[in-house]
Image: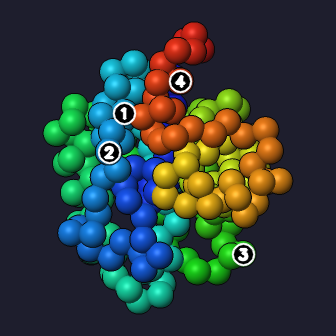
Amino acid sequence: MKLLILDRDGVINHDSDDYIKSPEEWLPLPGSLEAIARLNHAGYRVVVATNQSGISRGLFDLETLNLIHRKMHRMVQEAGGLIEAVFFCPDIDESNPYRKPNPGMLLEIGRRLNCSLQGVPVVGDSVRDIRAARAANAWPLLVRTGKGAQTLIQDAESCANVAVFADLAAVADYLLTLPDHD
């Protein structure tokens, strides 16, 4: 099985320092939905792993998060793709094992899909994503979209030995050149 795990904000859609609090605020990054579709067509199962502390902060509720994800799923489907599942952590508490940079959410994906995360690409735009991927024995990839460019400047040490791409479309271009690992 070819699995790809994506962070949401800054990878699939535009990010905001004020959080994405409504379906209207969820706007896909150029080329991201088509990249997911291309990867699906090449046999990748795509799953999202996202911290959503805006829930615990009282900025939006679970129903609103579901509406945001419904919009994301619909738009990906309209582009010809599929996001198989969305895993999220609503907690603010950094000690929660499921909140990135902790690996719990990624490990749960591996358990639910009954697969090893060894070598599974995890695409993110922050040090949290890189650390979670490394802790889960997955393959961290960084995009410059979202907070990615800032992450490269502010925490170059954490980004050492991490492949960096302009955006999710560039990640797809790269992954589609790799030989199949099935």
The residue indicated by pointer 3 is 95
Answer yes or no: is residue 109 visible.
no
Mark closest to the chain's N terminus, 4 or 2? 2
139 or 156, which lies in front?
156
19 or 31, which lies in front?
31
Mark 4 vs mark 2, CA separation in Å: 17 Å
Mark closest to the chain's N terminus, 3 or 1? 1
- Please give the label number shown on residue 140: none
Q: Is residue 132 left or right of residue 108?
A: right
Which residue is situated farthest in the left direction here? 78
- Please give the label number shown on residue 30: 2
Is disc 4 placed on a helix, strand or loop? helix
Tell me where residue 68 appears, x and y as whole percent: 27, 64
Mark 1 vs mark 4, CA separation in Å: 11 Å
Which of pointers 3 and 2 indicates the residue nearer the eye?
Answer: 2
Query: What residue appears at the point 68 percent right and 76 percent down from the top-left corner?
Result: 94
The residue indicated by pointer 1 is 35
Tell me where residue 121 appears, x and y as whole percent: 60, 35
Q: Are marks 1 and 4 in contact (CB under 8 Å)?
A: no
- Please give the label number shown on residue 174: 4
Is disc 3 placed on a helix, strand or loop? loop
Q: Which three-letter amino acid code belongs to the residue tagged 2?
A: Pro
Q: Quadrant of the C terminus?
A: top right
Which residue is situated farthest in the bottom direction here? 58
Mark closest to the chain's N terminus, 2 or 1? 2
Mark 3 vs mark 2, CA separation in Å: 34 Å
Mark closest to the chain's N terminus, 4 or 3? 3
Which of pointers 2 and 1 indicates the residue nearer the eye?
Answer: 2
Query: What residue appears at the point 42 percent right and 34 percent down from the top-left corner?
Result: 169
Q: Are marks 2 and 1 in contact (CB under 8 Å)?
A: no
Tell me where residue 152 appears, x and y as whole percent: 68, 54
Query: What residue appears at the point 83 percent right and 53 percent down from the top-left corner?
Result: 157
